[in-house]
Image: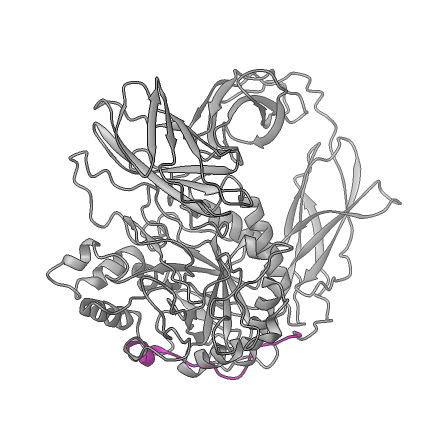
Amino acid sequence: MSRRVSKRIYGRTVAAVAAIGAMIAAMLVALSAPAMAAGTGTGYLHTSGSKIVDSTGATVRLTGINWFGMETDNHTFHGLWAQVTWKSMIDHMAQLGYNTIRVPFTGDSLRSGAQATSINTNTNPDLVGLSPLQILDQVVNYAGTKGMRIILDRHRPSAAGQTALWYTASVSEASEIADWQMLAQRYAGNTTVVGADLFNEPHAEGTEPNSTGACWGCGVQARDWRLAAQRIGNAVLQANSNWLVIVEGVSCPSGGSPNTFDNIPDDPLTCDWWGGNLAQAADFPVQLNVANRLVYSAHDYGISVFDRQSWFNDPNFPNNLPDIWNHFWGYLVQQNIAPVLIGEFGSTLQNPLDVQWMTKLMQYMGTGVNGMSFTYWSWNPDSGDTGGIVQDDWVTVNQNKQSILQPYLIPPVGGGTSSPPPTDTTAPTTPSGLAASGTTSTSTNLAWTASTDSGGSGLAGYDVLRATGASGGTFATVGTSTTASFAATGLSASTTYRFQVRARDGAGNTSAVSNTVTVTTSASTGDTTAPTTPSGLAASGTTSTSTNLAWTASTDSGGSGLAGYDVLRATGASGGTFAQVGTSTTASFAATGLTANTTYRFQVRARDGAGNTSAVSNTVTVTTTGGGTGGGCSVTATTQTQWQGGYVIQPVRITNTGTSPITNWTVTFTVPSGQTITNLWNGTLTVSGGTATVHNNTSNPIAAGGTYEFGFQATRGNSDTSLPSGYTCSSP
């Protein structure tokens, strides 16, 4: 039942399907029989400069392994089909010296009704009938008894495959945040699970200047991975402030591959492996609301994964490699900015040059507890382009790999918390000194002296309670905060309110309420003058799921000041009703969560501090790009490369979204005027005007959930940069 899996990397797809990345961090939430400092540390993990340290301040080095499968359509660890028990595999990892397991997963595996498959009922009868999450619980608990740590890795939006961005048309950023918060709360109090690798290998897509992939520091909300990591990471910390937040790099900072056909020389160090480029992290750092929780992570691979990285051909190889690593991520450690976890690295070692690469990389990371943390790719033998530490029987060790890694491994010692975690029944101390300042007609700013928690589960945050009136009434929770301050907004003018605050720990214990502070909002300004109408509304950067709106700012002369803008949307080129879909305090807005191949209209209106609203702006109409569905199939198209006068679209991937095989499919899309498709493979093409239609040219069925790919090449005018759009798929 061995299943071969390959990875995709910048510049080429070596294959696709499950992979597990790496990355590792540390941080925890409870303390009971913790690992010794010589292993994975004591208590919670956090960061200090470029080091990961434990609760005593001792430096901890995580030397781990990737065990993948929960991100695939098996929804659980691969190898559970083998003639060896799951516990014996964890025992074997620990015996070899791996003190951490990085666990890739997809949101599909967390859903109610998800089923774990390919489990050998003879060797692992204790896992039969368990859900993917319940199996993960078992692995976490048993690894904890060995003194090992667990890193959770959001490897893919869905089991369908890796994507350039952290979200898709069907899997939103909000759903990813919800998954992370559920996991953070599920394992709160369990010191074995130490952190969240937010998303695996965000990377470039499209060719400059038509970049559509993950960028770093570009400022585009829909594509800037650094900004997304801040949003997702802070949401994780809001649910569990004791976890480490692990943030991988991108491949190309612009989010697109260099244009090799524009006769402009490209810096060979512009792009790195998927997830490996952190060159912009110093200038555009990830900023989290909880200090000392950020760990950056990079991936690096050998020739067996992709043999055309320029540095492999340097005559000074492998001595040129440290300068490459310094450029992309090593400087973060050298300058004491933050720890870097090498979350994935691996090779088959069939090429002797890869032995040199891997030996040099381990030397670069350093020896002993002060070296960089890492998680090797992979335990699994079914990683198609690297193989594993164990061979196809899931027992026999590949000694060529292990001998290179062995001097750098720090075996686990003792045990972290196992199931059930120790029960924390001690409430945090009561917040004190609650005070209000800056009270206006609609808001006030609260601040207090922070609480502390000694029960072991850690301070999780604060609940803010409010009652109306100088006395009487009932206090109700109106907000939460992870810091000792809170901006209370949406208040009524000339009204008295009372506020209290209580602290909350990771086990759910709450303190007594603080002192009560009473505020009375000021009188309304009597402003009845609406702001000026926003003008020049325009859209740019439209993708299959998002568009960026911008407009000329409004002004307000009524005295209450401009408060912000309401963004309204209607579906279709005409008709329908405009409804508010968001707000902004600036003259721009990233509209996300859109449906592919769909037309939308947007308007904006301004709002002042007294609640007056302007007339709506001009209407802007956008149509999202490919990725649409129809019948029993969906289609997505990827621009492989483009140049002056032409481009290649490959793959155009058809997915069977139904529950039974399909034997016939039709894909249609619009070809811009003046362009000609000169070659198409794996399909039959007809063109009528600007509409291209592609039919299957084989009767081989596409299984339910399966995929089929075709591609094409086209010519266009030298000044033409447009690309086909409006991809749809249908099947009888």
Residue placed farthest to the front in the image?
699
| Vertical position of residue 258 compared to residue 600: above or below | below
Residue placed farthest to the right in the image?
472
In the rendered image, residue 481, in percent from the top left (x then y), is placed at 64, 51
Of residues 128 and 647, the one drawn nearer to the viewer in this rendering = 128
Of residues 163 and 512, the one drawn nearer to the viewer in this rendering = 163
In the rendered image, residue 555, in percent from the top left (x then y), is placed at 54, 20
User: Left of 688 or right of it: where is 660?
Assistant: right
Asked if residue 206 can be seen in this view, the reply is no
| Vertical position of residue 82 compared to residue 321: above or below | below
- Tell whether position 413 is magenta: yes
| Vertical position of residue 434 compared to residue 701: above or below | below
Residue span colored magenta:
404-420
Of residues 349 and 298, the one drawn nearer to the viewer in this rendering = 349
Q: Main secondary structure of the magenta part?
A: loop
In the rendered image, residue 623, in percent from the top left (x then y), is placed at 47, 25
In the rendered image, residue 95, in percent from the top left (x then y), is placed at 43, 83
User: Left of 186 or right of it: where is 149?
Assistant: left
Of residues 286 and 653, the one drawn nearer to the viewer in this rendering = 653
- Tell whether position 136 is magenta: no
Residue at image position (54%, 77%) is: 123
Which picture quadrant has residue 543? Answer: top left
User: Left of 126 or right of it: where is 490?
Assistant: right
Q: In which quadrant of the rendered image does the N terminus lie?
A: bottom left
